[in-house]
Image (cartoon, helix red, strand yellow):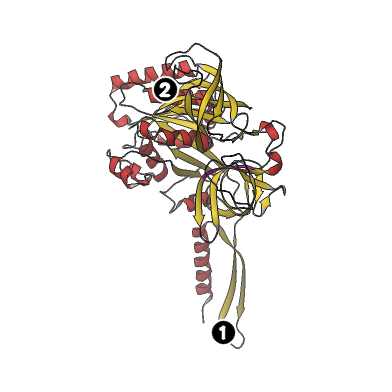
Amino acid sequence: MATDEEFEHTIDTLENMAQQLDNARIVSIKKRVLHDSERVVAEVRLAQKAPLPQTELRVAVLGDYGAGKSTVLGCLTHGEADDGRGKARLNLMRHQHELESGHTSSITLSTVGFDGDGRVQNYTNNRSAEHIFQRSQHVVTFIDTCGHAKHLKTTARALTGYSPHVFCVVIPADAVEVSTTTREYIQIAAALGMPLMVAVSKMDIADKAGFAALMHELLGTLDAVLPERSKCIVVNVDEHQSLADDMMRMSVVPIFTTSAVRTLGFGDLTAVLGKSLAKRVAYSTDGVKPFEFHIEHLYSIDTVGTVATGWVHNGAVAAGGAADTQQLVIGPDSSGNFVEADVSSIHTLRTPTESAKAGMSASLAIQPRSPITIQKGMVVLGADQLEAGGRRISSEFTATVTVLCSDLVKMQAVVVHIRSTYHLATIVDIGSSTELQPLGCAQATTGLRLRLSGNVRELIYPGMPVVARDGRSLTFAGRVTAAM
């Protein structure tokens, strides 16, 4: 016969197991003695805890080739110091050639979470990404991009297709000057109206004179491109909340100095990100916020079918249909067609849920009612919203852009990135513009009219970000003003 002490010890063990799961709790214990026996039986009922209200912030990490972007993220997400030879970045790299060369060639997502008390949740104190999500109320998703020019297509797709809320430009402290690529990223942040932060890496190998010259040039570049924003070098500050609010309001550009080898500067960086909340952007101009989901990646699962991962821009959807019972459609294909579709199951932050709401990453099991080849860059939204809020299925549109080169001419062909896809387009008309200036000087903005080539039609709407490239160089960046 088990003693009362042994029984309590058993219950304590079950409670510890539930705590390890983090999303379970004991709700009832029914204890009884078996008939004609002194043996004790207990029925213990466990239930999942109510999910924590979560917010998510997406940070696009940009920088030149060799700036140390992946190394900085490796320290942030895994809490491990670098060995000076790239050890910290190994946890983020996905391909063998990346491990061999040390250079990122694909978009990689990594995560840091913050619990209700503001404590950092990363792989130091969690065994998996799912564990981080379960314990976090605020999640910061880092979008690690490529620095090399030959992977510019991949980086451009991250800017338009992954819905970042903040740009984080990484600059090595041992750099001789602010590179042209870095200046372009700062200009893109200004053109898209994005909050911007700067992380200076490799402080452990910087010399005093060279670092002072670099910071002088960096501040001059920021003043030229973003004169309306204050600049703040962050060193052991206490007002992380106000700094985060000012950054998200685009009134200040914080500059963090970091060293992955010495793990210096990451405390202020993580604290500010932990206080930063994304501003939800509604593209609808009539006050309606229908469901809108942008597809970033696609997977095929035998028992489920096609699963699309991406970002919920507006509204909400429930498994089996939209939360407001509207019919969903998916598209467009190359001809601009949409077909009706159903959502059979949903995961948000790798956790099964009944619904997905605006401002969160989600994975949707999509079942089209008619044949269509689902691709990256497609949109899932309410059928009655295809023409709402200025949306149009069109091959021609106008945009206000910042020119990143000085040789735009009519009928010039460029590759335009729209959401997670890209198309060849022709510059049909060039409006009035400011006088073109060298990079790092006043913004050169202009209005363009573009036409997608090959009879391709896309879903276009005002405010949609566009980035164009020509070969291995960026041409312009801006936002759509109207679909034609």
Residue bearing mark 1: 38
Residue bearing mark 2: 183
- Which kind of residue does numbered mark 1 sit on? Glu
Q: Nearer the viewer, mark 2 or mark 1?
A: 2
Q: Residue at x 54, y 53 (%)?
A: 306
Q: Residues within 10 Å of mark 1 (few under 14, many from 20)?
A: few
Taking the magenta stretch, the answer to whether it contains residue 294 is: yes
Q: Residues within 10 Å of mark 2 (few under 14, many from 20)?
A: many
Name the image quarter holding the C terminus.
top right
The residues bearing labels 2 and 1 have C-alpha atoms spaced at a distance of: 79 Å
For numbered disc 2, what is the local secondary structure? helix
The percent position of residue 269, horizontal first and vertical second, equals 44, 34
Q: Is residue 334 left or right of residue 69?
A: right
The percent position of residue 450, horizontal first and vertical second, equals 55, 25
- Can residue 148 be seen in the rendering of this structure? no
Camera-side residue: 300 or 210? 300
Camera-side residue: 31 or 176? 176
Total numbered labels = 2
Disc nearer the start of the sequence (2/1): 1
Magenta stretch in the rendered image: 286-296
Q: Residue at x 33, y 45 (%)?
A: 90
Q: Find the residue positioned furthest to the front.
A: 454
Q: Is residue 280 above or below residue 306?
A: above
For numbered disc 1, what is the local secondary structure? loop
- Which kind of residue does numbered mark 2 sit on? Arg
